[in-house]
Image (cartoon, grey):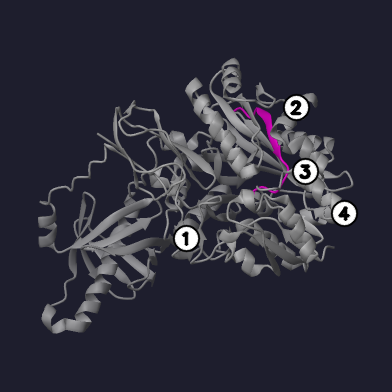
Amino acid sequence: MFSKILIANRGEIAVRVIKTCRRLGIKTVVVYSDADAGSLAVEMADETVHIGPSPAAQSYLVADKIIAACKQTGAEAVHPGFGFLSENAGFAQRCADEGIVFIGPNPGAIQAMGDKIESKKFAQAAGVSCVPGHIGEIADTAEAVKIAEQIGYPVMIKASAGGGGKGIRVAWSRQDVEEGFPAVRAEAKASFGDDRIFIEKFIESPRHIEIQVLGDKHGNVVHLFERECSIQRRNQKVIEEAPSPLLDEATRAAMGAQAVALAKAVNYDSAGTVEFVAGQDKSFFFLEMNTRLQVEHPVTELITGLDLVEQMIRSAWGEKLAFEQKDLKINGWAIESRIYAEDPYRKFLPSIGRLVRYDPPKEGDHGAYTVRNDAGVREGDEISMYYDPMISKLCSWAPTRLAAIDGMGRALEDFHIEGLGQNIPFLAAVMDEERFRSGKLATSYIKDQFPDGFQGTEPTPAQLDILTAVGAAMQGVYVARARSLESELLGPPRDEWVVAIGAHRRRVRVGGEGEVTIALLDEGRTLTLTDIDWRPGKPVFKAALDGKAFTVQAAPAAEGFTIRHRAAKARVLVLTPRSAELHDKLPEKQAADTSKLVLSPMPGLVVSMDVTAGQQVREGEVVCVLEAMKMQNIIRAERDGVVKAVNAKGGDPVAADEVLVEFA
C-alpha cells in the first residue's frame, strides 16, 4: 500500500481523504493557497506545501505546482478530490509520466468520459440514449445562437469540463444565449481552465438520478446503486438522497446495468458516476459521466457500508475489488443536505465572511437516526470569495426514508452558525414540506415550491407553541435574575404575560424552574418544558416540549426575543398586559425607498460596469456583472430610467447592499 499520498484539493474533501488515509496508516500531504493557509486540512495533514495565491487558476489548477509538491515531499500518489484537476486527463497523464499514481481513473477513461463533449459522442456511438443537442465545441456567441434556435428553446449551455453546478446556464430565448454564452465561457475558464462549451436541449421537470460505479484495474466493475439529486438551484445540487424514491427494482437494475456497461467500455478503474435525466414515468437518458468522486458520495457510503475513498486508493494500488455485484445490498436510507454560505432570503446569493459561531450537531447514533457531518471548517474560519461556498455536508441515515428525513430535520435544528448567511432554514423547510416528504421530486422543485423566493415559513400551530413556551421561559429567567439583584425595588413577582408573535396574542401564566409550565389562559391547556439546556447569552435553546425534543436559535431583542425553529423565524414579544395594549396602537414602520438604487446583492468583485452616468436604461437591461465564489451574476435594471451616478467600476470589490448605480 502507498506510504504517502498528496491531496490536490482543499476544504471538506481534503479533510475527508485525510481521515481515510489515517485509518489506513497512510501519511498525507496537503497543498494550500494563501486563502487556505490556516485551514483545518492544513492543520490535519502530516505535511503541507504552499502552492500560490488564492485564485484557483494560480494555485490548485496549476499542474506543475502539484507535481513539484509530490516530488518535494516524496508522495507516491495524488488524490485530486473533486473539481479542480480531478477530471483533467492531461494532468492524470502527466502524473503517470512522472511516476506518480493518480488516484482516479486512467487517462483514457477520463478522456473518453470526463469530457462532456467527447462523452456524448462516445455514448451515441455505443448506442446509449442521450439528451438531444449539439455534440461539439461551439466557437462563439453567434454560433451558439444559431445552434440554440435549431435545437429549440429552452436549451442548456454547458461547459465541457464543467461540474459542481459551475459553467452551466438555461437559456429560454435568444437574449439568454447572447448573455449566457460568454458568462458560461468565463466561468468555465476560471473554474476549470477549459472554456469549451456545448449546448443541449433542456428537458423540463426532469429528475436527476445518478449511478455510482466502482472499477478496478482487472476489468471488474460494479454499481453501488443510485442517488437522487433533483433538489437543485442554479444547477447546483442542494439535497441528495440514496436510494431514489422514484425507482423500482427493475428500473434500478436497468440503470445500473447500463452504467456498468458504459464504464466497462472505457476500462474504467476507479470511483465514478454515470448521470441520467429521468422522467416521472421512470424513462431515463444518459446525461454525462463524472470521472471522479462526487460531492454526495457520503449517502452511498451510508447505505452500502463502503468507504469510497478507500476503494479508490485500493484500486489505484492495483488491488482487485473485494466484492461482486451480488454481494452489494441497500441498507436503509440516507439524506445529504449541503450547508452553504449563501443567503436563501436573498435568492441564495453567496455570503462570504467569518464563522463567528460554528456548532454542528453531534455525529453518530441518535437512536432513531444517525448523523454524519463532513466539514473542512471550524469556528473562526473564514469562507472565502475564491472558492465554492460550501460549509459542510450534513447527512442523516435511518432504516426508512421518512425516518431519515425526520432525523435530518432534527440535525438541522441542532446546527448553529453565526457570522454569515447560510441556508439551514431553507433546508429545514424542505424537510417539513409535504411534496418532498412524498418523494414527488423534480429539478424544478425549488422554483415550483418557492416561486417568489424563500422568505421562511409561517409557524405551524406546533411551532407557535414552541415559540411561545421558549419566549415565556426565557423571560422568566431574565426576570428572576433581575429580582435577585434588586428584589426589594421590583414588588411581587409577575407570572402573567402576553406573548405576541405576529398577529397572535396569547395570555400565559409561567411557573416552575427546572420543569417550566406555561398555562395558555385563553385556550384551557398547559405546555410543559423539560430537559432545558439554556442560559442567558447562549444562542441555542434546547428542551423538550410535552416530551418532544426540539432546538431553537434564540437571541434577545427589544421587549422579547428573536427565535427561529427550523424555517419559522419570529420576533417573540413577552409583554405585560398594559404594554400589549399599547403595542397594538403603534403604527407600522415604513421600509426605506430603494426603488432608484441598484444595490449589490452580495459581496463580490465587479467584472464589468455596463452603464454610464446620463445613460437611458430600459427595464431588464444589464447594469453590471458581479463575480463571487466562481459564479458570475448578471445584475439587470428593474425599471426604466436615466442613470444619475455610477459608484463602482470593473475590478472593484463591493459589499452586500453597496449602492452600485443611482437612477434619477
Position above or below: 153 against 361: above
Q: Amino acid at mark 1?
A: Phe
Query: To which residue does mark 2 refer?
Result: 121
Count residues near mark 2 (Cα–Cα under 10 Å), then give few for <14, some for 14-19, many for 20+: some
Q: Amino acid at mark 4?
A: Gly
In depth, the one of 246 and 189 nearer the eye is 189
Mark 3 or mark 1, whichever is nearer to me: 3
Q: Position of residue 39 (x, y in %)?
A: 58, 64
Distance of label 3 from label 2 (alpha carbons): 19 Å
**Residue furthest toward the right?**
218
Mark 1 or mark 2, whichever is nearer to me: 2
Residue positioned 63% across, 51% down in the render: 58
Mark 4 or mark 3, whichever is nearer to me: 3
Mark 1 or 4, nearer chain start: 4
In depth, the one of 152 and 450 nearer the eye is 152
- Can I make out residue 322 in this image? no
The quadrant the N terminus occupies is: bottom right
Q: Report the disc number at residue 90.
A: 3
Distance of label 1 from label 4 (alpha carbons): 41 Å
In contact (CB < 8 Å): disc 2 and disc 4: no
Distance of label 1 from label 2 (alpha carbons): 45 Å
**Residue furthest toward the top?**
150
Distance of label 2 from label 4 (alpha carbons): 30 Å
